[in-house]
Amino acid sequence: MKLRESAAFLALLEVGLVCASCSRDRDGTAPAASQPPPSPEVEVTRVLSQKLGTTVQLPAQLMPYEVVDVYPKVTGFVKSIKVDRGSRVKAGDLIAQLEAPEVVAQRAEAESKYQSAESQLAAAQAKLAADEATFQRMSAASRTPGVVALNDLEVAQKTAQADAASVMALQKSAQAAQNALRSVAQLEAYLTLSAPFDGQVTTRYVHPGALVGPAGGPGAMIPLVQIQTLTRHRLVVPVPEYEAAGIPEGTEVRFTVPSFPGRNFQAPIARISHAVDIKTRTMPVELDVQDPKAELNPGTFCEISWPVRRAYPTLFVPASAVASDLERTFVIRIRNQRTEWADVKTGATSGKLIEVFGDLREGDEVAVRGTDQLRPGAEVTPRLVNPP
């Protein structure tokens, strides 16, 4: 039995050796070790260089082209007021009538002084005419010796000269009195207030009997009314500084108004401030809005399609290619199948592309989907796709 068991063990050992020999390669080497996993595949696209031409939506506010608070130029009481909130007026229409008894008294006094000066001047001119005639007759008679004494002739001449001087002084006095009368008459005319331009009364501040006056004077607490234009407006839009360049005055711009959903309006760029507000980093720009039917209401917030242009080409990548963390904004560039983080600053968007500024060149390959999980120096297999 022991011999049989020994023979069976040897047979099994021989079979094991044969199997081990068969498992080797034909050249007698051991099987190869397992290969490392392949590099992850990353979709990449090339950085584009092109001129920016797009529009961005910006908020804007509709303002009246002209707006004024109407103050009186003299102090007085409101005798009557002819307009109220919502009244439409034409330039020169009567707004209010004031009364000021002291102005009426000044007018009467000025008229009296002017009439007195005119009367004195007329008397002086009559005396001058008579004295000059006397002198002329005496001068003619003096040509006959012994008819007129030389002293009398000299007295007549001096009298005429004195009269002429008196007339000149009275003329100046009469002119001054006339100017004073005109001044008081103008002051009295200020008691009648008229509309300075065509528009609409938006606010009425006073009622009959109220004491009003010029700015800085007694009674200058509030204006009488506020008037603003109806058919012409200023559309004021604060344009971010990086979107303000390259748009000239006269460019037509579209905008929408909430009170007219689905309707587009157009207006030209009329005034550009060319100065950036240091607090908001925006530049105020005004559009000149013509509104002949008076449909638009000043004070309304609008949305404007602002055109953004660049006179030179800039670089673009898909918006999804830009990634950011707490410290930086970057795109992932692929070089020699290795990843690099390239810091960028973003600009305007154009469709699915976004403008970028940084250490990039046209034609560089960047990952279509930027993520901070793809660390710098990682080995990848790039697969080129067309930009969106």
Image: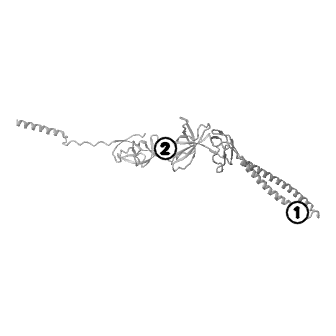
Q: Nearer the viewer, residue 84 or 135?
A: 84
- Circle 2 is placed at which residue position? 52
User: Left or right of 127: which side holds 45?
Assistant: left
Give the x, y percent position of residue 156: 88, 61
> Where is the C terminus found, in terms of image quarters?
top left
Residue shown at 72% from the left, 47% from the top: 101
Residue shown at 55% from the left, 46% from the top: 284
Give the x, y percent position of residue 252: 56, 41
User: Left or right of 371: which side holds 53?
Assistant: right
Q: Secondary structure at mark 2?
A: strand
The label on residue 4 is none
User: Left or right of 27: which side holds 207?
Assistant: right
- Circle 1 is placed at which residue position? 155
The answer, for residue 157, to whether it is visible in the render is yes
What's the amino acid at mark 2? Leu
Which marked residue is nearer to the observer: mark 2 or mark 1?
1
What's the amino acid at mark 1? Val
> Where is the N terminus found, in terms of image quarters?
top left
Q: Nearer the viewer, residue 294 or 2?
A: 294
